[in-house]
Amino acid sequence: MAKIAVEKPFDDVKEAMEEKGHQVDLVESDQELTGYDLGVIRVQNDGDNDLYDFPVVSIEGMSIDEVVERVSDYVEKMK
């Protein structure tokens, strides 16, 4: 099971991913994204691409279902 961090205040995204069986924690900011397999953040800037050593999904412009689908795609690729 992938360990996923979701940036606050996206409780609805956290709950939707937990319903899919993922282990999910809420974090205060993208600065706390260490020790996870995948992160879900508000916005990913172009300069942020090298900050993480794991996949990061930006919520910007996506519905909850789209975020969950994107996360599920990444988790499947990790297997």
Image: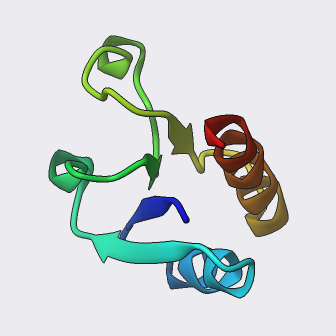
Horizontal side, residue 16 vs residue 31: left or right: right
Horizontal side, residue 5 vs residue 50: left or right: right
In this view, which residue lies farthest toward the front?
A: 79
Q: Position of residue 11 (x, y in %)?
A: 50, 83
Residue located at (55% from left, 78% from top): 14
Residue 51 falls in image quadrant: top left
Residue 21 falls in image quadrant: bottom right
Q: Position of residue 25 (x, y in %)?
A: 36, 75
Horizontal side, residue 75 vs residue 25: left or right: right
Horizontal side, residue 43 vs residue 36: left or right: right
Residue 69 falls in image quadrant: bottom right
Q: Position of residue 17 (x, y in %)?
A: 65, 74
Q: Closer to the camera, 17 or 47?
A: 17
Q: Position of residue 7 (x, y in %)?
A: 37, 63
Is residue 61 visible in this depiction of the protein? yes
Is residue 9 visible in this depiction of the protein? no
Q: Is residue 56 above or below residue 67?
A: above
Residue located at (23% from left, 57% from top): 29
Q: Is residue 75 above or below residue 46?
A: below
Image quadrant in which the C terminus is located:
top right
